[in-house]
Amino acid sequence: MSQLVVRRLLIDLETPFARDWCAGDAFRTAFFNALSMSFPFGEQFFIDAVRAALPLLPADEQARRQAEVRGFIGQEATHRRIHALFNAQLEKQGLVDRWTPRAMKRMELLKDADPRHALAITAATEHFTAMFAHWLLAHPEVLAGAEQRLQTLWLWHSAEESEHKTTAFDLYRATEGSEAWRARWMRRVTTLFLGDLARQTVANLRHEGQLWKWSTWKSAWRILGARGGLLRGNWAAWRRYFRADFHPSQDDSRLAEQWLASHSDRFVPVGG
């Protein structure tokens, strides 16, 4: 069982930040803004999925997993709150979140479904966030030039995503979720998540008048497509998810552990 600590982040998100907060880079700013827009609804979905699946286990197994689930929920609830504050600043800048309404409409289709479907979606999305987290922790220069409070926000979130990456997956396996559906939902999540991320990033760039600039797409290639970029660099990790013997713990978590250990002055543990 993972020992998950809930942390209160010691940063101020009430004070406005610059429109081009990520070192003046239009693409990086729009991309991270798009990701943040997805988090409040997404984190709540993950919380609800884990809560709904836990009663499927025998009472003794529920008790064994209770502490980890409580820690998972606490971390995700904190992410939801922090990114809601970040997104409130984006709203003041005139950016419109078009991702959340689409996601809410889709998830209505799961209203009466077996709760293991929502858990499989959660496990798949958590693998996505864990891949992104590891990549960002390995490439902190992506955030170089941003205010320290915003660097802290994204790297802390990344560290905790890596820290709790096994919770939903283990719970899905414990509830005897179908391996075929685990793979199906990863393929669907891949298509929907990347599609929504692209659409929201483009909308953000269009709003800022940066969509058709060469510098924007040169930055996009460096971040996403170049050797070691986010997409190209995570292809192998994405494919591993479909292996029958896959487990999230097979992916290295040392960068997350190191970041949390060396930046303990930026948060206060509040429970676990």
Image: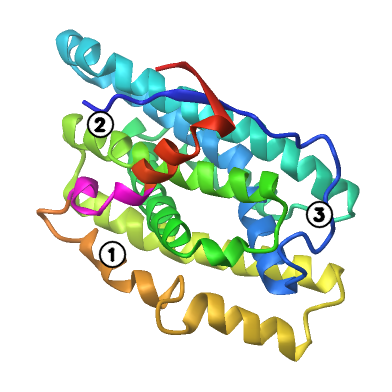
Q: State the SS at label 2.
A: helix
Identify the amino acid type marked 3.
Val
Where is mark 1, residue-wise?
237
The spot of residue 272 in percent (x, y) is 39, 17
SS assignment at label 1 = helix
Q: Is residue 166 magenta?
A: no
Q: Pick the residue in front: 123 or 192.
A: 123
Residue at image mark 2: 171
Point 20% across, 30% down: residue: 175
* Earlier residue among tags 2 and 3: 3
Count residues near mark 2 (Cα–Cα under 10 Å), then give few for <14, some for 14-19, many for 20+.
many
Question: Farthest residue toward the left?
Answer: 245
Residue shown at 19%/8% (left/top)?
Answer: 59
Q: Residue at x 31, y 22 (%)?
A: 68
Q: Position of residue 131 (x, y in %)?
A: 38, 58
Q: Earlier along the polypeptide chain: callout 1 or callout 2?
A: 2
Residue placed at 63% from the left, 63% from the top? 144
Magenta part of the chain: 247-255
Which amino acid type is marked by label 1?
Answer: Ala
Q: Quadrant of the N terminus?
A: top left
Find residue 12 and name its label: none
Numbered circles on residues, count: 3
**Residue located beneath label 3 in the image:** 96
The reply to whether the magenta stretch includes residue 250 is yes
Q: Where residue 231 sits in the image (x, y, percent)?
A: 43, 73
